[in-house]
Amino acid sequence: MKKTTLFLLLSSLIFLLSLTSCQKKEELHIYSIIHEEETQALCDLFTKKTGIPATFLRATTGELVNRIIAEKDNPNADILLGGASSYHIQAAAEGALEAYISPLAEKVPDFAHSADGKWTGFCLLTLGIGINTKRYQEKFPEIKIPQSWEDLINEEYKGEIVLTNPVASSTAYLFVQNQLQRLGQEKGWEYLLKLAPLVGQFPDSGSAPAKLIGTGEYAIGISYLHALSKYKSEGFDVELIAPPQSVGDVDCIAITKNAKHLEYAKKFVDFMLSAEAQTLMSSIDFTIPVNPDASPAKGSLSVEDIDLIDFDSRLAAEEKNQVLEKWSVSVK
């Protein structure tokens, strides 16, 4: 009798544990290149709207793109969130991305998504120059604030410029391509090799220059304009310069090949293309939404205010390995 009772108790416990396991909702896993604050806010809103839990790993563009390529047969993440289009083009060429065209993709400009649905842009990215005005005035009282990319080539600025490492950061690689595409290969490399010795620090994170400018550790930084706008809005002593002949690209979202939670991933892509998600993101980091129904943050720049070159993102992707190898060899 005791054995029968024990057996029934154990059977009931096993059943309850099995039921609990079945009821537990699986999580959407995200590799995120955008900042942790924005990623967490977006995940929270996504979960609130869909009931689907979402977790993320935040790291640099180079690290996460290399991860999804290496993991394409057995991915640890379902979504790659963020990163310029050239990196997503590279990942797609390596067979690491799943095709999905969201119903909301029709609101996205043609240049901001791939025709095959491997990646879609959710906000516009533009590069510029940030100035910590107090430090600049102390260091260079007789030099006018630089207004163009050419103005940065000044020996007086040696050690006072901060630019991220192009090998690790999509921000800096976009800057490298900006110069190569506006000037041509020969003159573009001539420009880059003149600028590099003037740079005081090459951090890996694309968010670092805006922060280092805002806190006054450097006088001049090359960064996304939306990142500089955010620091200025928070009261930091930052001036924004939008130089002529800059590049405009998009932060993209993509589903990883063989994603384990494919339906969840599709829902997250739909979510990121929604006006609600893009309005939320702009309110935090001052990015410019691609969805025309979204509301950009007050104080963020408009694309109409910026002189953009005709940027070839596919070319940037195709020659990335070659360009970064040359950078690594040439810049010490």
Image: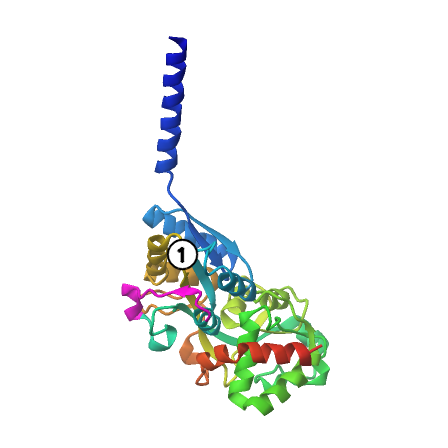
Disc 1 crowd rating (10 Å Cα; few below 14, some 14-19, many 20+) is many
**Residue 283 seen in the figure:** no
Q: Position of residue 279 (x, y in %)?
A: 38, 61
- Between residues 148 and 79, which one lies in front from this camera angle? 79
- Between residues 253 and 191, which one lies in front from this camera angle? 253
- Please report the residue visible at 62 percent of the width from the left and 68 percent of the height from the top: 213
94 is higher (above) or lower (below) than 244: above
Q: Is residue 166 left or right of residue 310?
A: right
- Circle 1: element type: loop
Q: Which residue is mark 1?
A: 259
Q: Position of residue 32 (x, y in %)?
A: 49, 59
Kind of residue indicated by mark 1:
Ala
220 is higher (above) or lower (below) than 5: below
Quadrant assignment, res 308:
bottom left
Q: Is residue 167 left or right of residue 16?
A: right
- Please report the residue visible at 31 percent of the width from the left and 66 percent of the height from the top: 101
- Please report the residue visible at 33 percent of the width from the left and 54 percent of the height from the top: 263
How many discs appear?
Answer: 1
Instruction: Verify whether residue 281 appears in magenta.
Output: no
Q: Quadrant of the N terminus?
A: top left
Q: Quadrant of the C terminus?
A: bottom right
Q: What is the magenta range?
A: 94-107
123 is higher (above) or lower (below) than 76: below
Instruction: Verify whether residue 95 appears in magenta.
Output: yes
- Between residues 141 and 317, which one lies in front from this camera angle? 317
Residue placed furthest toward the top: 1
Q: Position of residue 302 (x, y in %)?
A: 42, 75
**Residue 146 seen in the figure:** yes
Q: Position of residue 242 (x, y in %)?
A: 51, 79
